[in-house]
Image (cartoon, rainbow, N blue to C red):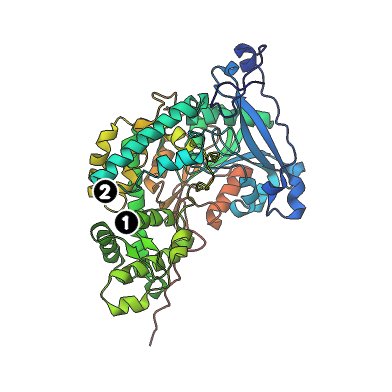
Amino acid sequence: MLALATGAVGVVAPTASAAPEAASAKAPAPVTWHQCAPGDLAGVPAAELPQYSCADYAVPLNHDRPNQGTINIAMMRRAADDQAARIGSLFINPGGPGGSGFALPKSGRAIFEPQVLDRFDLIGFDPRGVARSTPLRCFATEEDADQVFGRMAPLPVTAQEERTTLRAIKDYGQFCARFAGPLLEHMATKDVARDLDVMRQAVGDAKLNYVGFSYGTLLGATYVNMFPNRTRAIILDGNVDPTLRLLDGVEYDRQRTGGFEIALDGFLSRCDSAGAGCSFGGGARHKYDSLRNYLRHQGPITLSDGTVVDEAAMTGTVASALYSPSVFTQLADLLQELWAAISPSAEAARSAPAATGATLRTLQAAGRPRADLLPDTPYTSDDSYLAVNCADKPFDNRPSEVPAIADRWERQMPDFGRYQAWSDPALCPSWPVKDADAFRGPWNRRTDNPVLVFGNYYDPATQYEFAKRMSRQLGNARLVSVDSFGHCILGDSSCTDVIAADFLVDLEVPGPGTVCHPDVQPFPAPPPARTS
């Protein structure tokens, strides 16, 4: 079969006999499962290997015009332990957007209770545009990508940095317009939800069972409102505010930034209350503000091993670390070493832990692959994150307005306002797709069973208020609140995990006002007070 067009990155043209009416009337072809590549099953216990299978499944590029060709969705299945008592399939999405969910079934035991693995086939998939599925790529070579991204300052402060970054962002959009191909016009969450419905039918399920994390909550909310009668059990963990996200991108991202501020405040307060259990304690908020101001006005700090940390590095590292309470102790150690480097107090210097560049790298999210030294290295990343966000979130601001937005957000939210303003609000106005066909509601279609919504009090990326809004906006939902730090909770709280298992297996929901706690709180507990 022929490629649809230059730059189509794997889009396949239909045969001449295909017709839109016939294609839309037909039930989807069943998934043809095959043996997974050995490397894809690394880490799976030998006894479980026979339970795994993989597939590349074709879905329409454009569901409204299926004769325009197909794209591939990469899928992995872990078969239920008890096939005789199998309920159906459980689809899982990790969020992003742009997160690869293909291998998530391998993590099933870390996320779900045993009865879920007994009763469900776990199915992970890379959504359209992502990783092993037909990827959305804006560059032909890694060198082109690095030349563009290398000119984007992660935290523009000076007028020159702002101008250079805006020019690079404009170039990014132009590369996408030239190279991304027809998939670029079909990357909204609405398209992914329609893919999910096709996959549901293709695995033989009458109704969808689904767990979505982070952005995956928007995918789940979109699905239940597009196909309310095709849902069985839907769990949303780490929730967006769907109405605001699809109505006003700038305001959504401004409020989302507030979640990082809340989480950092909670981290610093908990650090102080942990006493000797947190190395950065003892006026943690004052120390953090002093660090931020020093980096802005005095310049970078050099760690004991020679690693240079500037304001952008500290801000990005802290934002990433707030996702995972398990690294809070290391984050405190890093901040304390930075503090010791600028503090005139000898006591502070002596108490500084040995945080190094390795600590910094551990705390940071994995970056883009670096270019190698050979010319014309093929670009193997994908650009699905912006393709989805810029399709879903409407941004009415002009690129020239971003510096003023960043200034305003920084006054409102000094820790992360400028940093977050230079993300989607800066990038999406230059994105080549305008007026994308996104699903924008209504969000209140009623499902037979409640949608189960989990929200952490100190979730940085999807603040707790968003979970409350999600539960109110959906036509039938039950909110479970969690007194926890970190982004998403399943797998880290026996309370939430049991609730999720009871819901998935027996469709039981907890009572209104249920509050759970994580199994492990950040920082060692302070020793009990001595009594005389």
How far across and down, in percent of the image, does residue 375 sit?
52, 42
Rendered residue at 42%/24% (across/down): 436
Secondary structure at numbered mark 1: helix
| Separation of marks 1 and 2 at Cα, in angstroms | 10 Å
Q: Is residue 222 left or right of residue 109?
A: left
The crowding category of the residue bearing disc 2, from other C-alpha atoms within 10 Å (few below 14, some 14 to 19, many at least 20), is: some
Nearest to N terminus: mark 1 or mark 2: 2
Looking at the image, which is closer to me, 403 or 443? Answer: 403
How far across and down, in percent of the image, does residue 119 sit?
69, 44
Secondary structure at numbered mark 2: loop
Q: Is residue 13 left or right of residue 375?
A: right
Dot 2 amino acid type = Val
The crowding category of the residue bearing disc 1, from other C-alpha atoms within 10 Å (few below 14, some 14 to 19, many at least 20), is: many
Residue that badge 1 annotates: 311
The answer to whether residue 243 is visible is no
Q: Is residue 524 left or right of residue 86?
A: left
Disc assigned to residue 157: 2
Looking at the image, which is closer to me, 82 or 135? Answer: 135
Tags 1 and 2 in contact by the CB under 8 Å rule? yes
How far across and down, in percent of the image, does residue 358 sit?
47, 64
Rendered residue at 56%/42% (across/down): 100
Name which quarter of the figure residue 335 lies in: bottom left
